[in-house]
Amino acid sequence: MAQFPPGQTLLIDADDTLWENNVYFERAIAAFIGYLNHREYTPQRVRATLNAVERETILRQGYGLSSFTRSLLDCYARLSTDSLTEEKRRRILGFAQAIADQEIELLPGVDMALAELSTRHRLILMTKGNQAEQADKLARSGLASNFSHVEIVAEKNPKTSQEVLRRHALSPSRSWMIGNSPKSDINPALAAGMHAVFLLHKDTWVLEHEEIDPAPAGQQLIEVDSFSKLCAIF
């Protein structure tokens, strides 16, 4: 028997919650670092530089594959002693294109669990990123019919969470944010007055790492290690 009664609203993250995502970026980054093969900087130093470049790029143009591609090119220019020839540019673009070509890989049990949860609760997809990219992923995933609404936002923070609550006339006391990112899913939801379920994913993007805040009085914070286990909670 589920712990919580029917009629909850579950706001569910997409990347690395419903389907694999960051692992493909990690593969592209590993290929990029190997290609750069810098004689002065270690792979760890290159990765640290790329992380810093990504933070800068996100501030200028948001999330998504085009932002990541720009970060790879800028990182190369920042660290390489060689000029960026057209051949090298095409090679770097190829690392990013491999991500775009990747088929959607649902995480274990997601399709069946979503179908079951949608019979008892209101499900809203809430993800951040490029509008077209995220909408395309959802369409290719085959999961869209489980959701009553889709929210693709530029950033996830307490203000955005509160705006989504207001837009859908949701009660925070019956609303849950479910996701793998402490920074974008869990802490903003708790700050907005919602409950939260932290879904552990071993390959969560390093820029999404953050200490999880304790749940304020009257709010719930639950941790699970697989999406299927949500059916025993909700």
Image (cartoon, grey):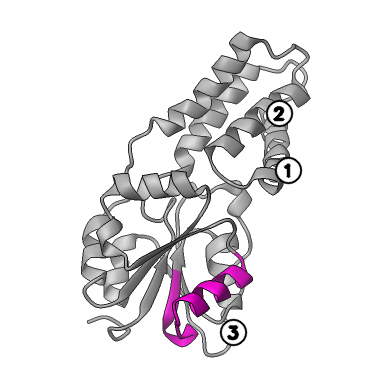
Q: Which amino acid, mark 2?
A: Asp
As rendered, which of 20 and 43 lies closer to the eye?
20
Q: Tell me: 227 left or right of 119.
A: right
Crowding at label 1, few (<14), some or many (≥20) Cα neighbours within 10 Å? Answer: some
Give the number of the disc on residue 56: 1
Quarter of the figure with the N terminus = bottom left
Secondary structure under tag 3 reads loop
* Magenta span: 157-177
- The mark total stands at 3
Asked if disc 2 and disc 1 are in contact, CB closer than 8 Å, the reply is yes
Q: Judge whether residue 198 can be spotted in this image.
A: no
Which residue in the protein does label 2 denote?
A: 74
Which residue in the protein does label 3 denote?
A: 216
Q: Residue 132, position in %: x, y?
A: 45, 45
Q: CA distance from mark 2 to mark 1?
A: 10 Å
Identify the residue at horizontal 53%, vertical 64% (top origin). Answer: 185
Asked if disc 1 and disc 3 are in contact, CB closer than 8 Å, the reply is no
Q: Residue 196, position in %: x, y?
A: 48, 73
Q: Quadrant of residue 116?
A: bottom left
Q: Is residue 203 magenta?
A: no
Q: Nearer the viewer, mark 3 or mark 2?
A: 2
